[in-house]
Structures are given as C-alpha cells and as structure tokens.
Amino acid sequence: MKAEKGRSVEERYTQWKSLVPVLYDWLANHNLVWPSLSCRWGRQLEQATYKNRQRLYLSEQTDGSVPNTLVIANCEVVKPRVAAAEHISQFNEEARSPFVKKYKTIIHPGEVNRIRELPQNSKIVATHTDSPDVLIWDVEAQPNRHAMLGAADSCPDLILTGHQDNAEFALAMCPTEPFVLSGGKDKSVVLWSIHDHISTLATEQGPTKSPGSTGIIMKHASKGGGSNNKPVDGPTIGPRGIYQGHEDTVEDVQFCPSSAQEFCSVGDDSCLILWDARAGSTPALKVEKAHNADIHCVDWNPHDTNLVLTGSADNTVHMFDRRNLSSGGVGLPVHKFVGHSAAVLCVQWSPEKSSVFGSSAEDGILNIWDHEKIGKRQDTAGLKAPNAPPGLFFRHAGHRDKVVDFHWNASDPWTIVSVSDDCESTNGGGTLQIWRMIDLIYRPAEEVLAELDKFKSHILASEKN
C-alpha cells in the first residue's frame, strides 16, 4: 500500500515538474537536511533591478545528534517576468538553492514548532517548542552560533509564561499592537503584551540584561522542550489574560486584523471560539461543531474582518461569517472547500486580494482558492480544470510529503514560501520552495486576453514577413 502511494506521489510530482515552465513565473527549490515545521518571511532588506533580498525564518528539527535550531536566512526573490521558463524547472531535488543563504543560527531550547514575526518590529520573532513558554528572540542582537553536539542553548531575550501545560503550535502576533497570543494543551488561550519591552529589547546586547523595566521578573522559566529538559534562562513576563472555553488542546489562534482586543481560536474539540478581551475571559461566540474532526488552523481575513477560515483533520476548509456563525450550536460555514485528500494543516488569506487564500495539507498539496469564483462559469482562458472543486484555481504539487507550513509574501504579492516535512517519503529532511504562479492565471480574464491578443498579432505579422 505504501509502495503504491509512493508511486502515485512520484507520478504526480513528475507531471508537476514537467509543467513548471508553463505554470510558474519563478520557482526556487531548496533541500533541507533537517525538516522545518515553520517558514516565515521577514523584512525586505534590499531592492535591486531584477531581484529583492529578504529575510526568511525557518528551523532545523534534528534527531538529537546536533542541536535544534532557529535559522535566519537571506533570500533572493527574483522579480516578476525576469526568470527564464527553462531555467526554473532545471533544479536538483537534493541540492540547496543559490537563492537561499543562511545568515544566522540560533541554538533553540527544544525543537521549533512555530515561528511568528512581530509586525511592529521586524527584528523580533516568537517561537513555540514542546514547553509551556513562548520564547521571544531579537534575531539581530542574538549571536550567531555553530550548531554542534553539546553546544549550549542560545538564551531568549524574553520568555512569556502563563500556560500550565505544553503550548506547542498555537501562536500569533497582533498586527495593531505588540501583543502575543498562544494556545496549548491546558485548553487555554493566553494573551501577553510586550509593549513596555520592545524599544529596549532591540538595543540590549546581552541575554542577561532585562529588556524592560515594567513587571519583569528575573527567574527560571518553565522546563524547555525536546530532550534537554533544562529550565530556559531569561527574563520573563506573565500574561495579560487567560481565556478558557475549549474542552481540548488549542491548536491555533489568530488576532482580528483591526482590533488587538478581539481574537479567535480553534482546537481538538472541533470548536471555533471568538474572544473579546474587553468582555472578560469567557467566549464571546462559540461554534461547538465547526468541523467533524480536530481543527488544526485558523486565519482571519485582513481585508474583510467578518470572514474567518478554518482547516481540519476532516480534510476540508470552512469559511465562516462571524455575523452568522452557527445554527443550533453546529457551524454554519458560508462555504466548505473540498480539495484535499488528507488533514488540512495550514490556511492563510492572501495579503493582496481579499477573496483569495491558500490551504496546505498532509496530502502534499498547497491549494490556492478564490471564493468569488464559486458559482461563476469556467475561466475563458481555459486555466481551470472542468472537474476542479468550486473556488480552486491553482494547485501547487511541488512537494512530495505533508506541507506543514506556508506564508504569503506581503512585500512581493503572489510569492509564497512553503515547506514540507519529507520524513515519510524520503526518510528524512524537508523541502523548502519559494514560488510565484504565472500572472496569466490570476489576472482578470479580459486583461489576459488583451495581452495574448497582442502576441497573436505579433505572431501573424512575423508569419507574413
């Protein structure tokens, strides 16, 4: 059965690779020795004629022979309509990409499960590991480390305490205030404000210096994750609020894009909960049965704050309107997106277009959807398969194992970084891909046809000559 599955994955991959010159404007394939469970864009560093340089955050989840790390890389992002079609498909799956260069390594206390960057200060990132704490890092001030066996862990610049059990995945940063949100096995959602510590956090040079003066308690935080099981040293702050309403592990959290006081969470209890910190620590709205299985991920639309996406182990993505969330306790999604054959692990709205979002899953596929296309006739450009699920307009099949994370690039719209954990397909490592679909796929049909018409007249003129 496994051999059969492997064959079908390889066939799908071979077919995908043959179509790369047709479907993609640019693609970079970067082999990872160790899998990364998270990938995130950082700030743009430099703009040049044909490409931009940008920070990229990823991690190395090791087997213990070398330490787990948080990796800060510099990525060359080739600009649209620059790369030659034949070049982007000529890559070696086993090789590292020349477009991705490691800039700094932080030796992380335990494996990195999740990375999130602070919108107000591009130097600050938060990480989750197999522990109750959230670790805050000033990636510019942290020393570059050599990850070798026996090397001491890097010291985080700030430790956020408040969970009573491991908080492994659910992590979010607020777009409007320097707030951090987390969820964990203690069934709680925890909120912190690092407002008083931001300015000094970026300038303090030593991990033993306090990154702020208000409410900082110097002490050992909870035990770190992974196999080291040692207390993590560093200044700590307690939570601003603890919110309880879930009956099982909280798997993901997200802030409302327009309000630091409103946020949502999903969990293994199949619930979607909306919270309002101004109204106390109990749910503002609770959808008891938002899916038919564990819910792994949630995202709130930055353009239309009524719309929330959820992705589940039932293989579907649901889109909810918070004005009409449920009926009789059962979730009432505006639409159910059915296009994966395994559990959905990550959902994210596009920063560019309000109706577009991506979803990645354990089936190795990253789907791009547009909910405005539902119910409309097929694209006249013929870019959509007749049997495609409603709303689906692009399928990225460049990974051969579960796509554990992806991130739209806000500085370079329609450019996506995605990462797969390849342990099952290749017995180790991972694949990082940075890609941009060809613009003929997402631009308005009339624009595309007008452009193609110019080529048609050019070709006809050439033939006459």
Image (spheres, grey):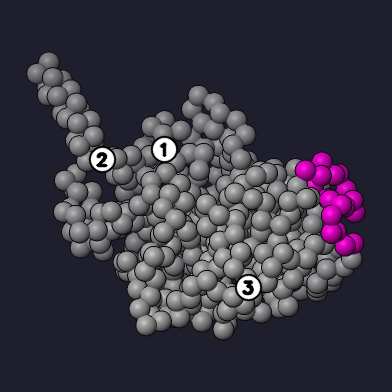
Quadrant of the image occupied by residue 226? bottom right
Report the number of discs: 3
The location of residue 239, given as percent across then percent down, is 73, 66
Residue type marked 1: His
Q: Is-magenta flag for residue 205?
A: yes
Residue at 23% across / 48% down in the picture?
383
Viewer-side residue, 98 vs 42: 42
The location of residue 13, given as percent across then percent down, is 38, 59
Residue type marked 3: Ser
Which residue does the numbered mark 2 point to in the structure image?
444
Residue at 89% across / 66% down in the picture?
219
Say which quadrant the N terminus sits in: bottom left
The location of residue 28, given as percent across then percent down, is 48, 44
Which residue does the numbered mark 3 point to in the structure image?
281
Q: Which residues are magenta?
A: 199-218
Say which quadrant the C terminus sits in: top left
Q: Is residue 194 above or below residue 134?
A: above
The location of residue 258, given as percent across then percent down, is 52, 52
Quadrant of the image occupied by residue 446? top left
**Circle nearer the N terminus (3, 2):** 3
Is residue 331 at all visible to an observer of this figure? yes
**Circle nearer the N terminus (1, 2):** 1
What mark, if any, has residue 387 been given in the picture? none
* Helix, strand or loop for disc 2: loop
Mark 1 surroundings within 10 Å by alpha-carbon count, few (fewer than 14), some (14 through 19), many (20 or more): few
